[in-house]
Amino acid sequence: MPYRVPDLRYPYDALEPYIDEATMRLHHDKHHQAYVDKANAALEDTEWEGLRPKEVLTMLDELPDEIRATVRNNAGGQYNHCMLWRSMKPGGGGDPTGALAEAVDATFGSADDLRSQMKKAGIGQFGSGYAWLVHDGSRLAVVSTPNQDNPISDGMTPLLGVDVWEHAYYLKYQNKRPDYIDAFFQTVDWETVAERFAEV
Ligand SMILES: [Fe+2]
């Protein structure tokens, strides 16, 4: 079945004032749709058609040269944006709880320290990409990736990603990526992140 852009679980303006409605409409309806369309076109009539993005992204080496980069970028765009919409919610923010909180505190010191590391990784990502909280197989870690790469391609489990492409913030924050990252954390749905952590 071809990929599709899932509906948001909240209205486009529900993340105001942190993430503005115009950015959400453009990001979800146009940018995400473009990744989906390009991924579907590249995978159509291949043996990988029908695999989920997370499956395709763990077997990029097996794809033919002609489509590998297109699939990496656009199946990545599909996977990353589906994760992103579900990582945010109206009334989000705050700190993680439960087992995730314990792991965050043990690894980073505190939720503030985690946010600080992710912010630093997001600011430090040259050009477009993401900063991630991941489970690297043995522990939590913060990493960054370029373009639409996902840590799952490197054998890690992504738990939370902040999209630092300019399309994610430029309408409201212009060049102020640090301010956008701070605002993003006011929307994080830590329960969803904890569910991902529980499945590691
Ligand atoms: Fe994006």
Image (tube, rainbow, N blue to C red):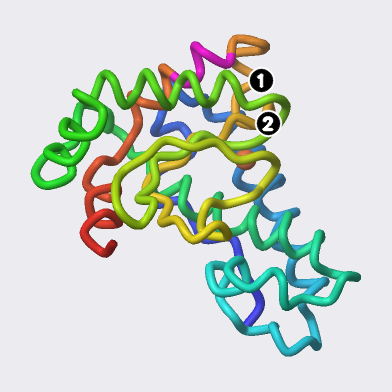
Three-letter code, disc 2: His
Which quadrant is home to the C terminus?
bottom left
Q: Is 151 drawn above or below residue 117 in the view shown?
A: below
Q: Is residue 87 left or right of residue 81?
A: left
Circles 1 and 2, Cβ within 8 Å, touching? The answer is yes
The residue where tag 2 is placed is: 167
Asked whether residue 91 appears in the rendered view, the answer is no
Q: Label 1: few (<14), some or many (≥20) within 10 Å? A: some
Q: Label 2: few (<14), some or many (≥20) within 10 Å? A: some
Q: Is residue 12 left or right of residue 87?
A: right
Which quadrant is home to the N terminus?
bottom right
Q: Is 43 drawn above or below residue 131 in the view shown?
A: below
Give the residues in magenta: 177-181
Determine which of the numbered discs, if any, sits on residue 170 in the image: 1
Determine which of the numbered discs, if any, sits on residue 98 in the image: none
Q: Is residue 77 left or right of residue 106?
A: right
Q: Is residue 195 left or right of residue 68?
A: left
Asked whether residue 73 appears in the rendered view, the answer is yes
Nearer to the camera, 103 or 84:
103
User: Is label 2 in a helix, a strand or a loop?
Assistant: helix
Q: Count the marks.
A: 2
Q: Position of residue 79 (x, y in %)?
A: 56, 58
Q: Position of residue 51 (x, y in %)?
A: 59, 81
Instruction: Tell me what residue is drawn at x 36 percent, y 26 percent.
Output: 185
On whether ligand 1 comes within 8 Å of the CB at mark 2, the answer is yes
